[in-house]
Structure formats: C-alpha cells, structure tokens
Amino acid sequence: MRWVDVKASLKDFWFEFRRQKGGLFGLALLFLLIFTALAAPYITEPDIPKKWTQYWEGNPVTVPPVWYNYFTTKKLAPHEVLTANDLKITADGQDIGGGMKYYSFEFTYENNYDVPPSDIIIRNIGVKLADINSPAQIVVTVIRPDGNKIELLNTELREGSIYQLAKDGKVKAAVFQWASQFENPETIAEGGETLKNTMDTMKVIFAKAQEGILTNPEALKGTYTFQVEIFTFTEGDQVDLSTTQIILSGRTYGLMGTDYKARDLWAGLVWGTRVSLTVGVTVAVLTVLIGIFYGVTSAYLGGWKDEFMQRVNEFWASIPTLPILILLGAAFKGHVSLWTIVFLMVAFYWTGIAKVARSMALQIKEQTYVEAAIALGAGTGRIIFKHIMPQIMPYAFAAMALNVPGAVLTEASLSFLGLGDPTAVTWGQILYDAQTQSATINGYWWWVIPPGLAITLVAFTFVLIGISLDRVLNPRLKRL
Amino acid sequence: MGYGKYIAIRLLNALLVLALVTLLVSVLFTKVAEEDIKSSIQEQINLKLRSNPELQKQLAADPEKLQEWYQREYNRLIRVYELDKPFWVRVVERTKDTLTLNFGNTKSPIFGETAVSKIIAKAIPRTVILFTTAQIFVILIGLLLGVKAAQMAGSILDRGVSIIAMVTSSIPMWWFGMMMILIFSFKMGWFPSGGMTSMPPKEGFAYYLDVLYHMVLPVTTIVFVLFGGWAWTTRNIMIGTMQEDFIMAARAKGVPERKVIYGHALRASAPPIVTMTIFSLLGSIGGAIITESVFNWPGMGRLYWTALQQNETRLLMGVTFVTVALYLIAMIIADLAYGYLDPRVKVGASQST
C-alpha cells in the first residue's frame, strides 16, 4: 500500500466512524483515561506507588470524602494540617531564671462542624535536650468559645515525642474531670468508669457545656484557641518550632476518602488507570497479533499442518482460563509481577481470534486475485502480508478493542483475589482490601464504589469503541 | 465418520486435556508443597527439641551430637513426607491421585470436613442451587428481551437492550455484588449480607424459606450482570435468521407473525442458543468464582477463595480439577447438542474432509 492510499482509507474510515455516536463518546472517554494515566504524577504525587504499600501516617483511617458533607445533615470536620506558618508564636525562649526557658505558641481552630476532628496530633517539635535524663515540659491548654479553659495535657517533652490528644489517657482524664461539673451527678454515679472509657474525648472538648455533655455531646461552634507551652530546664536545651506540625485528624478526607491504611483513595484511583490501561491494551494487542499470525499461517499452510495447528488450538482453548490463572497466581504466591499476569492472559486468550482469522484467511485465499498472484509467482510472504493481512487488519482492530474489557476485568478479578502484583496500585487490589476489611458490611461506600466504577468505565470505553469499529469495518454488520 | 466415533474422539480429547492440565497443576503444586513441607519439618524438629528438656540437656553439651541428631530427625521426616523421592515421581503420583479423585486432606477443616472430596461434594450442590436458579432467570429474561428486540430492530427497546448489554458486560460481577450488599443489606437492611442460612440454621420448611431469602441478593446480582449480554446475543442471532429466505417465504405464505417468529425463526436460531444455554448452565457449576466469596456463599467459588487464603494446596487442586472436568463435559455436551439440533451441521464432517 502506498502512503496516499493509507491516507485515503484512513479518511474514509474516519468519515464512517464519525457517524457512530457511541464510538465518538468512547474515543472521548479513552482520551480522558489516557490523560489521567499520563498525568497521574502531576494530579497526585509522583511517589504514590512506593508509598502505596505503607501505612499513611498522619491521615485519618477510613473516612469519607470531603464532599460527603453536601449529602448529610451533620457536617463532618475535614482533615487539616497546620505548619509553623499557621502558628502564632507568643514566646520564643524567654529566660525565666534558673536556666529555665519558656516557649509558647497558639493556634486557632474554627469549628463549624457538627462532628469535630477525631484527633489532634502535635508532632515534630524540634527539641534538642542537653541532658537526655531531664526532659522538657509541655502544657497544652484549650480556650473554648464560651470562655471555658481546659488544661488538656501537662507532660514530658522528649526528642521525637508525638502527642495524640484523643488517644492520650491523661487528656481523657482531664477532659472527663472538667466535663463532669456540667453533667448530672446521677449520670456520673451510674455511668462511672464506663462513662469515662466510652467517652469520645474530642467530641467532649468541642461540645456545649451543658447536661449531657458526656452522654450525648452537642457540638459548640466557634473559635477554639489552643495554647502550647514548653518549659526547658537545662542550660543548652534547644527548641525549634519551625518544623512543628499540628494535624487535626478529619472525619472526612480529600476527594475520595481514605482506606484502612489511611491511604488517600483518590491517589490510588488515579494511579490505577495506568495499570488498567497498560494491562488491557497490552494483552489485547498481543493476543490479537499472535492469534492472527497463528490463524493465517494455519490457513495458508493447509493440509495436515493446518489440521495439526487446529487441534493444538482446540486443545489449548478447552483449558478453562480463570481457574488456571488463579492456580498459577497461587503458585507464585506474592511474586506475580504485572508482566507475568499479562503473559499468562496472552497465553490463554489468543485461541478464539486464531479461529476467526483462519476462517477469514481461508476465504481470502480462494479469491481470484490471490490465485492470480500465486500464478504470477508471488512468494508466500508477499501473499500473506500484501494480500491476506490487509484484509484481516480491520477485523484485528475491532478485535483488539473488544478484547480490552475482558483483560481489564480479568486483571481486576485476579487482584481482587489477592493474586495481583503487590507492588502495583490497582483498582482490583483496592477492592480486595475493601473485601478483606469488610468495607461493604461497615458501609464504607467511598472505598467500594469508585474503584468499581473506574473498572467499569475502562471496560465500557473499549466496548463502545470496539462495537463501533466492528460496525464500520465489518460491512456484514452494517445493516443491523 | 459416525456419531459414535465422533463422541469417542471428543471424549478422548477431553480426557487428554484433563490429564495434561492435571499434570501441569501437579508440577506447580509439588513445587509449592515442597517448600511448605520443608518449613513445617523445621518447625516440627524445633518443637520436638523444645518440648523435651532431657534431650536438650543431653545435646546442649555436645554440638556435634546435636548436629547429628538434627540431621537424623530431618532425614526421617523427609522420608515420612516422601520428599526423598525424585521430583518427577512425586509429580506423577500426585497426578495419578488427582485423576483418581484421591485428593487427600486439608490442613484444617472446611465446612466441617477435612477430606477434600467430601468438601467438594458439599460445595457443588450449593453452587448449583444458586447459579442454576440465576441462570434460568437470565435465560428466560434474555431470550424474551432478545426476541422482542430483534422483532423491533432499531426501536427504543432494541437500543435499550444494546446499551444495557454494553454497560452490564463492563461491570465486574463481584463488584456489583458488593454494591448490592452496600445498598440493600447495609443501607436498607432488607436482606442478609451473606451466607446461605441464618445462624443457627432454621428447621423444616422455614429452612428453605430462609435459603431463598439469602439467595435474593446474589441471584439478582448474577441476573442483572448477565441478562443484557444474553439478550443482545439472542437479538443478533435472531436478526441473522430473520433475514433468511425461508422466513420471507413463510411471511409470503401468510403465516401469522407470531408463528413466524416463535415457530420458524426461533427454532432455526435454536442451535447456537442451546449451546449457549448448556455452556452457561454447566459452567455455572464452577460458579462465578469470585461472586460467591463476596456473598460468602459456601459453594465452589468460596472454596477457591478459602483455599487461596489458607494456602490449602490440596483443596485448590481438587477444586480446579473438578471445575476443569465439568467445563470439559459442558463442551462435549454442547458440541453434541449442536450437531443434533442443527441438521445443517454434520458433526464430525470437518474431521473426515
């Protein structure tokens, strides 16, 4: 074929394809998916695959996305991280005699939510102690919008100390003691220790000071000021507040929420596009190429060679794919790389296409122009590549597109069974985690719905394109 | 070539496939099991040493003696587990065992049994109940919709069927199952989230009602994901048939339209549709492998999941063997049915030419 012919046939093809609304829609989706896959490092962060296997420290665990608030009557606090810039430093190393120094800073929190943050984490205070055995002291106090003041924490500060206020027993005791004055004494007498143990510290800190603060806390909205004071006792102790981080652990997080390892599901969703597209397209292209090569060769050789190749094909085709894939996956437990999965799928999926390609090639072989070419002394290669292949290629493109969904679904299924590549971020694996952590029974919808929709979307995109290609390229179907 | 000879060749082919697949799987699992056993041998020796203080005292003094004792114990256990035999002998033995349905035992009881064959015998009927019920719905709905869509090609119904078919065939069935649980079990609380019966199981007639109640969500899931594809395929086959001359002739003769469609066209379309039916019915015994584990339905699919999770290699082999065998049987039956139903297809003709 000359270049002009290629251009002309492409033009013709596009003219036909343009009229397939579904195909155009599929093409648009495909571009969107490819864009997402390519831009993944820029949309999220570039080191997501490395981070993915770990626990994401500092993030809240299994919380819904931020936009969930639009659908609920109770507004949930989002996740917030405060750094040194958000802190108001009120004392930076004041000498208070006897070698003691005083540091203090404040941060405010605007509580406009019905459910407050689940935790407040104070970390990365840059302390350098001259003597390890004499730690510094840290005091955390909250001033509530109603003027009440609670000393939450008064404890040692060492290098690398992290304070999780909601999980701290001392904070719990302090808050319980403070709140008790508002609660009905009978309730406290009845509830006793259990009341204290079951109390949600954060909810009480951010609750209205009234009866029921312990049993049924009602959020008090307004500005909360947190004061953190640090005392050092030894000459030479250094405190550097510029690295300090305050994490207000949210009841909601990001665009898609988090899972049980506190991972940002949005990042997983975006990165999953890569695996899904790569696996789907690679498997489809390789399968079709191998299948067509096998089928055409078989048809062209004819005779006992054809017969033999067809028996091999039938034999191979009668092996059920998924159970064998599962078995092979289990045999390589935990070490199945993405490329092994691709290889295995290709190894099992080419048979159907080979059958169709053979029957097409048999028909083409009988055409008069092929016979003429043979009579004129054309070589085998020339006949296969010049006369047979171009006739089959349109079918091949449609077959490739139609093969992608199967590959995407199979990869997702294998990952869902826990047999996927553990180092890759895939939607199937997100759903596997969701299943093993009983996400459905716990109602963690944000963990289940988006990855499944994503798989469906990719499969659907290629179904649309494949069926449209089929309609355009296989004239037999045009009238349907 | 006669029908009998054809059957014989098909059967032989199927048996060959079965044997080869079993051999392949045996190679894999003999390898996997070897590592498993070796680590378990180490553990057993250590346990023996730890639980016997006298022996400890005796051996602690003399490191050489300890080494010797260790080696002796190791060799003894290797012989007990038959690891002293060459790899290929073990593979062939395992293949033979599997082919004669001698699957062995699992490490820990599943469904209250440890014999793999008994576990599978318990699982198959459960899968049949679930998937066969679902498949019957799928076939009925799919056929009806498909025929109607073919009859009114280009109508809204026809387009609707195509769109539903495209969308549902893109959905992972197990994910849709998770969605059903999320909506109808978690949010609405209408149906149980999994299992085949309540715990503890009910007695008498209430038991069957209870099973039916537990079947609602999984059956709905399977039917929803599969009926579109069925309807679409039926539609395409029917449209192909309706364009043939004999339909035109029937219409020209004045045969009522209903009769043309159900009497002539559907009958002529029967062979591929029946093949599809047999495949999906028998294929359903293998179960949509993952869907069952989502619904915690104690059938073949859940067995796969359990075997994978608990690293039960023998169970995995047994389940795979049975699944492959059933699949091959389905292929043969479908082939034979096709030849029987469609007089145009001379079964075995391709072999003789």
Image (spheres, helix red, strand yellow):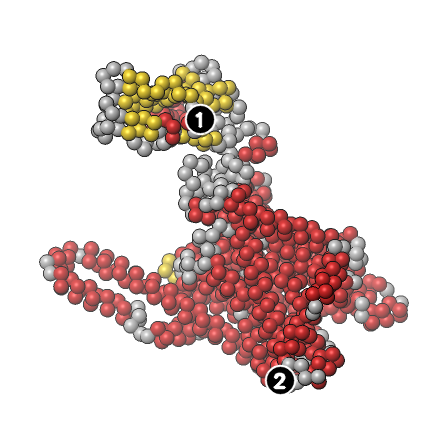
As rendered, which of A240 and A424 lies closer to the eye? A240
* Chain letter for mark 2: A
Mark nearer the N terminus (2 vs 1): 1
The vertical placement of A398 against A260, above or below, is below
**Closer to the camera: disc 2 or disc 1?**
1
Residue under the image location 51 percent in, 20 percent down: A221
Disc 2 and disc 1 on one polypeptide chain: yes
User: Label 2 crowding class (10 Å Cα cut-off): few <14, some 14-19, many 20+?
Assistant: few
Residue topped by disc 2: A303
Q: Secondary structure at mark 2?
A: helix
Q: Secondary structure at mark 1?
A: helix
Q: Which mark is residue A319?
A: none
Q: Quadrant of the N terminus of chain A?
A: bottom right
Residue topped by disc 1: A85
Write down the quadrant of residue B269 in the picture: bottom right
User: Label 1 crowding class (10 Å Cα cut-off): few <14, some 14-19, many 20+?
Assistant: few
Amino acid type, mark 2: Gly
Total number of numbered discs in the rendering: 2
Disc 2 from disc 1: Cα separation: 81 Å
Residue A360, can we see it?
Answer: yes
Residue under the image location 23 percent in, 61 percent down: B45
Residue A120, can we see it?
Answer: no
Residue under the image location 15 percent in, 62 percent down: B66
The picture places residue B190, in percent across and down from the top left corner, at 58, 42
Q: Quadrant of the C terminus of chain A?
A: bottom right
Can you name the residue that lies furthest to the left here? Answer: B61
The picture places residue B118, in percent across and down from the top left corner, at 44, 64
Amino acid type, mark 1: Asn
Residue under the image location 42 percent in, 58 percent down: A335
* Chain letter for mark 1: A
Can you name the residue that lies furthest to the top here? Answer: A147
Contact? badges 2 and 1 (CB < 8 Å): no
